[in-house]
Amino acid sequence: MDGHTLQDRLEQWPRLPYGRTPTPLEPLPNLTRRLGGPQLSGPQLSGPQLWIKRDDGYGPGLGGNKGRKLEFLMAEALRQGQRKVVTFGGLQSNHARMTAAACAALGMEAHLFFFAQRASALPGNLLLDTLFNARLHFIPFGGGSGASLTLEQTNRLVRWLSWALVGRSYFMPVGGHTVTGCLGYVVAALELAAQVAALGLAADKVVVVTAVGTGGTLAGLMAGLQLIGSPIQLLGIDIGKLWKAFPASIARLAGDLCAVLGESHTFHPANVPMIAETYAGPGYSVLTEGTAVAIRTLAQAEGIILDPVYTGKAFAGLLDLIGNGRFSPNTHLIFLHTGGLPGLWAYGEQVRG
Ligand SMILES: Cc1ncc(COP(=O)(O)O)c(C=O)c1O
């Protein structure tokens, strides 16, 4: 289908607009030069051209990729007449923080579940959660750490807990990983394809790189690009080794997104464009040396800040792949900045090196 048809179909869903789109797509000239790539008007050397798409400031509560998902999810919660929203994540969950902000703005109660001991200090995202007056529920056991549960099993577990502890509510799976939420990244796929065309870049030479937590962002982009037949390639970098049988969850979600948008397509788990595990280090939220270096590299080359849990880890993977010659010189690499900045304040000195 063409972009207009997809746009029309997407407009059938209720949606709360959380910002101005398109989010900026900007070149990273200094880092491109440092890595041996071409300048916009200069000679081509041996590296790819680097770009960044700024979803980091999009949406409520300091923004991030969850803003695009929350546009659809909060609209669904309102339509159901719910007054409470339940969701969960890691202690530094950006999704939880942004959900709390969205709830505050709509006069709803946010209930955030964390599979952890109640922390003695509440830094970073947790501080913001409390400022948004979210109810924090710390569950010091279970949660499927170490990829012992699938994403779907973990969601069922929290849903059950929330029935017992919160009662009637709108349940939002971890990371907003639902068909409704991930329509937000189908929208983003359309937006990206239009920006690539407007810049005159050859779409088949474009690779979009994103951090993968629950995989909803990647699934939405996969579905969107598939639906409009775009040759733009995707590369997800798993940052957490969080879920059992993870690519299957992403493939299923991407297929479900295509189906609700009127076209059937089967994605095979083996073809999910994701590097699993290699760059996740010891696990979710564990800062790696490569991540700290990547954060400093982008900060010092371009004045742009990445976060320690998601974007820093993914960018570390990207830098490693570039160093290993994975991309040909005529590639345009678009790093999707998915946000997460408040998490930096939970890591402090460790990032400075
Ligand atoms: C800053 C940031 N980047 C990337 C991701 C990954 O997005 P997804 O869960 O859609 O894979 C998340 C959340 O999980 C996030 O908070």
Image: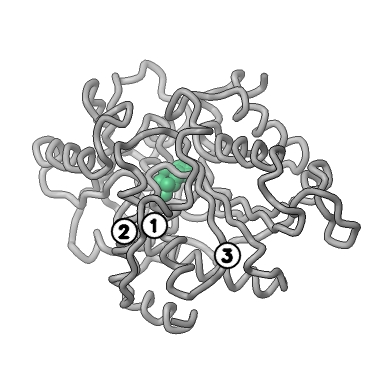
Q: Secondary structure at mark 2?
A: helix
Label located before the other in sequence (1 or 3): 1
**Looking at numbered disc 2 in the image, what kind of residue is underneath it?**
Leu
Q: Nearer the viewer, residue 258 or 312?
A: 258
Q: Quadrant of residue 174?
A: top left
Instruction: Give the residue drawn at x 48%, y 30%.
Output: 124
Distance of label 2 from label 1 (alpha carbons): 6 Å
Instruction: Give the residue drawn at x 38%, y 65%.
Output: 16
Residue that extends furthest to the top in the rendered view of this protein? 120
Q: Secondary structure at mark 1?
A: helix
- Sort mark 1 into few (<14), some (14-19) or many (20+) by Cα contacts within 10 Å: many
- Camera-nearest label, 2 or 3: 3
Q: Quadrant of residue 205?
A: bottom right
Q: Position of residue 11 (x, y in %)?
A: 38, 77
Q: Which mark is residue 123?
A: none
Q: Secondary structure at mark 3?
A: loop
Q: Is residue 269 left or right of residue 149?
A: right
Distance of label 1 from label 3 (alpha carbons): 22 Å
Label located before the other in sequence (2 or 3): 2
Q: Quadrant of the C terminus?
A: top right
**Looking at numbered disc 3 in the image, what kind of residue is underneath it?**
Ile
Q: Nearer the viewer, residue 20 or 261?
A: 261
Q: Which residue is mark 3?
A: 232
Q: Position of residue 6 (x, y in %)?
A: 42, 78
Q: Is mark 1 within 8 Å of ligand 1?
A: yes
**Looking at numbered disc 1 in the image, what kind of residue is underneath it?**
Lys
Distance of label 2 from label 3 (alpha carbons): 27 Å
Q: Is mark 3 within 8 Å of ligand 1?
A: no
Q: Which mark is residue 73?
A: 2
Q: Which residue is mark 1?
A: 69
Instruction: Give the residue drawn at x 20%, y 52%.
Output: 170
Q: Nearer the viewer, residue 315 or 54?
A: 315
